[in-house]
C-alpha cells in the first residue's frame, strides 16, 4: 500500500462531498430557489475555510512523506543524588514532533551504577528533529510516581544519518535540585 494512500482517500472524500452537495444545485434545470442560494453561499464559505485548513495539514504531510531524511542525535552525561552517583535512573531520548503525531522515542535506558549514561537514536523527518532528554527519578522523593524533567539537546548536535557524528555532553546533573517545568510521571 503506498504511503500516500490515506491522503488519496481524503481527497476522494472531499470530492464526493462536493459532488453530492453542489453539483445537483448547479445543474438543476429550474432557476435557483432562494434556499438553494443560501445553501450555496454557506457551502462556499465552508469550502473556502475547509480547503485552507486542509492545505495547512495535508501539504506538509505530502512533503513529509516525500522528503524524509534520517537524522540522529546523541547525549551523554552523569546524574548524582545528594552528591552520590545516581544509578538505575530511567533516561529517554525523544524527537519532539510538531504535528498530530506523538513524539518519537529515539532511545531509552538506565544510568549505570556510577550514574553515567549515553543514549543515541535516529528517525526520519522532513524538518530538523528536536531532541529532548527526559529523566525520571526518585531523588529526595517519597511521593508516588517519579519526578520527571526534560532537557532539550541543542539543534547543532543533530546529524544526518543513523549514528550521530557528535554527542551533546550534558555534564553532571544533581537530581536533588528542583528543575524548571518538573512534573510527576507514573507511566513512562
Image (cartoon, grey):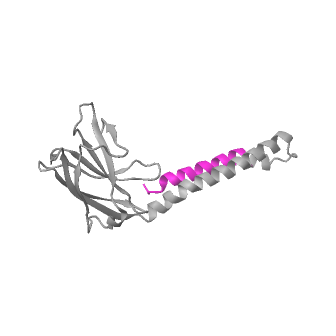
Q: Residue furthest right?
A: 31
Quadrant of the rendered image containing residue 118: bottom left
Quadrant of the rendered image containing residue 72: bottom left
Q: Position of residue 147 (x, y in %)?
A: 29, 39
Q: Position of residue 134 (x, y in %)?
A: 30, 48
Q: Position of residue 57 (x, y in %)?
A: 54, 54
Q: Position of residue 25 (x, y in %)?
A: 78, 46
Q: In the picture provided, is 153 more to the left or to the right than 45?
A: left
Instruction: State the residue in front, 159 or 59.
Output: 159
- Residue at position x 26%, y 60% from top? 74
Does residue 37 sit above or below 145 in this rendering? below
Instruction: State the residue in front, 23 or 154.
Output: 154
- Residue at position x 32%, y 52% from top? 151
Q: In the picture provided, is 54 more to the left or to the right than 1?
A: right
Q: In which quarter of the image is the N terminus?
A: bottom left
Q: In the picture provided, is 16 more to the left or to the right than 37?
A: left
Q: Is residue 2 magenta?
A: yes
Give the magenta part as a residue range: 1-22
Quadrant of the rendered image containing residue 126: bottom left
Amino acid at each position: 500500500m503506498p504511503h500516500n494512500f490515506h491522503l488519496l482517500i481524503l481527497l476522494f472524500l472531499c470530492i464526493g462531498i462536493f459532488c453530492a452537495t453542489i453539483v445537483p444545485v448547479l445543474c438543476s434545470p429550474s432557476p435557483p430557489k432562494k434556499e438553494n442560494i443560501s445553501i450555496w453561499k454557506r457551502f462556499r464559505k465552508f469550502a473556502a475555510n475547509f480547503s485552507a485548513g486542509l492545505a495547512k495539514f495535508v501539504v506538509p504531510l505530502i512533503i513529509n512523506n516525500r522528503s524524509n531524511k534520517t537524522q540522529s542525535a546523541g547525549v551523554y552525561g552523569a546524574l548524582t543524588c545528594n552528591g552520590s552517583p545516581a544509578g538505575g535512573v530511567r533516561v529517554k531520548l525523544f524527537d519532539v514532533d510538531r504535528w498530530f503525531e506523538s513524539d518519537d522515542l529515539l532511545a531509552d535506558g538506565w544510568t549505570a551504577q556510577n550514574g553515567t549514561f549515553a543514549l543515541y537514536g535516529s528517525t526520519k523527518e522532513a524538518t530538523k528533529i528536536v531532541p529532548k532528554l527526559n529523566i525520571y527519578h526518585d531523588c529526595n522523593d517519597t511521593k508516588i510516581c517519579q519526578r520527571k524533567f526534560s532537557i532539550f539537546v541543542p539543534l547543532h548536535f543533530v546529524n544526518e544519518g543513523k549514528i550521530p557524528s557528535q554527542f551533546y555532553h550534558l555534564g553532571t546533573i544533581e537530581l536533588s535540585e528542583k528543575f524548571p517545568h518538573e512534573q510527576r510521571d507514573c507511566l513512562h
